[in-house]
Amino acid sequence: MNAHSELDTEEMLKIRVAVLRQEHRDLDEAILALTASPAPDALRLQRLKRRKLCLKDEIVRIEDRLIPDIIA
């Protein structure tokens, strides 16, 4: 039963990474659109970039859990 739970956890993490990557891409588009506007809101732009960075950090943390360390 433990192997089954582990597989479920791994699949859930993969799905979570996919969702985070999509949100990361969406933020990229929002940042580009905001930057292209005549008078971009600097505070909003900063918040979007900070959120994008947090998403990237979370993606890396999850991927580290999914990919086992190889001891050389």
Image (spheres, helix red, strand yellow):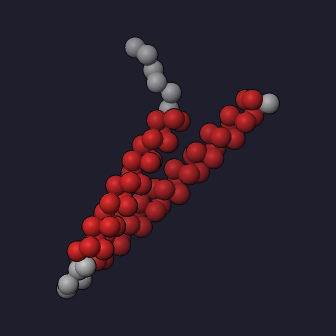
Q: Position of residue 30 (x, y in %)?
A: 35, 73
Going by the picture, which residue comes out furthest to the right? 1
The correct choice, above or below, for 3 with respect to 37 in the image is above
Q: Residue at the spot x=62%, y=39% of the render?
A: 10
Asked whether residue 32 appears in the rendered view, the answer is no
In the image, residue 9 sits, relative to residue 21, either above or below, namely: above
Q: Residue at x 39, y 47 (%)?
A: 57
Residue furthest to the top: 72
Horizontal side of residue 46 vs 2, given as left or right: left
**Quadrant of the image for the C terminus?**
top left
Residue ID at (73%, 36%): 5
Q: Quadrant of residue 52?
A: bottom left
Query: Exactly how many numbered labels are in the figure?
Result: 0
Q: How far across and how far down the image is residue 62, in percent?
A: 49, 42
The percent coordinates of residue 59 (x first, y second) are: 45, 47
Residue 4 in view in this figure = yes
Query: Residue 3: where, in percent of width, then height?
Result: 73, 29
